[in-house]
Amino acid sequence: MMNELTLLQRIVVWILPVIFAITVHEVAHGWVAKKYGDNTASALGRLTLNPIKHIDLLGTIIIPGLLLISFTGFIFGWAKPVPVDPQNFKNPRRDMAIVALAGPVANLLMAVGWALIARLGVAIGAQTEAVSLPLIYTGIAGISINLVLTLINLLPIPPLDGSRILTGILPSYWAWQYNRLERFGFIILLVLLYTNVLSSILAYPMFVAQKVFFSIAGL
C-alpha cells in the first residue's frame, strides 16, 4: 500500500511511528533497570518520552531517512542507548537479560497499539478517507517498524538485546568469550545488511508476524 504514496506522504506517515518505536524501546530498558535497582538512566534524565533526549543523529535520522527516500520498503534505526549499570543489580546477568528483553517487548506492545489504530481507520471506512487513510497508513508503518526492531534486536549479535538475553543463559566463561565479539557487532550487522543476509534471515519471521498483526488491524 505504501508504494502509492509520495515521498512527502511517506515521511509524514513514518515519522511518528519511527520516533516512538525507537524512543519507547530505550525508555523500556531504563524503566525496567530502575525496577531492578539501577537508577543510572533516571539520574541522567533518560526516562522520558522526549525524543530529543534519545535521538542519535546517525541511527534516528540519517539511516531511517536514507532508507525512506530510497524506497527500499525496509526501515530501521536506533537511538542513543540508555545507560545501564549491571553492578547495581542483585543478579547482574539475569537482571540484565530481563532489562534487554524489555526493549523488544515494548516494540511488540507498540505494534499491537498501531494495529488497533489501523483497525480504527478500517472501521471508519471509505466515507471519511481524510481520516481513515492516515490512520491506516500510519498504523501499517507503526506495525512494520516495531516488528523490524523486535526481530533485529532479538538477533544474538552483541550488543543487540538478543546477545544480552543469551549472555544471561550461557555459562559464565562462555558468556565472557561471547561478549568479546561486541567490538565487531556493528560491522557484522552492516555486512549482514549489505549482503542481504539480514533480509533473508528476517523475511519469514517478518512475514508471519505481519500476517498476525495485519489481521488484528483488519487488513
Image: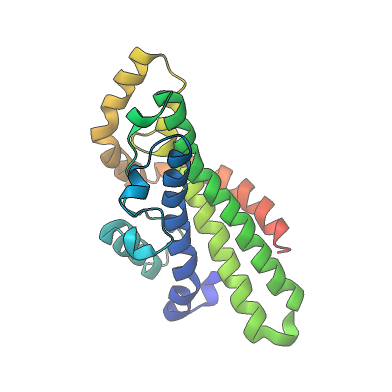
Which residue lies at the image location 51% right of the left edge and 77% below the top edge?
5
- Picture quarter containing residue 96? top left
Which residue lies at the image location 65% right of the left edge and 67% below the top edge?
117
Q: Is residue 155 visible?
A: no
Please provide percent x and percent y for residue 182.
28, 32
Q: Identify whether 92 is placed above or below 145.
A: above
Residue positioned most to the left = 183
| Nearest the eye: 89 or 202 | 89
In the image, 182: left or right of 155?
left
Please provide percent x and percent y for residue 93.
41, 24
Q: What is the tally of numbered marks visible in this picture?
A: 0
| Nearest the eye: 45 or 175 | 45
Q: Identify whether 91 is placed above or below 76.
A: above
Name the image colouring: rainbow
In the image, 21: left or right of 82?
right
Which residue lies at the image location 74% right of the left edge and 79% below the top edge?
125
Which residue lies at the image location 29% right of the left edge and 37% below the top edge?
185
Give the position of the N terminus as an image quadrant. Answer: bottom right
Give the position of the C terminus as an image quadrant. Answer: bottom right
Please provide percent x and percent y for residue 189.
33, 42
Please provide percent x and percent y for residue 66.
33, 65
Q: Identify whether 109 is placed above or below 19.
A: above
Q: Is residue 147 visible?
A: yes
In the image, 130: left or right of 99?
right
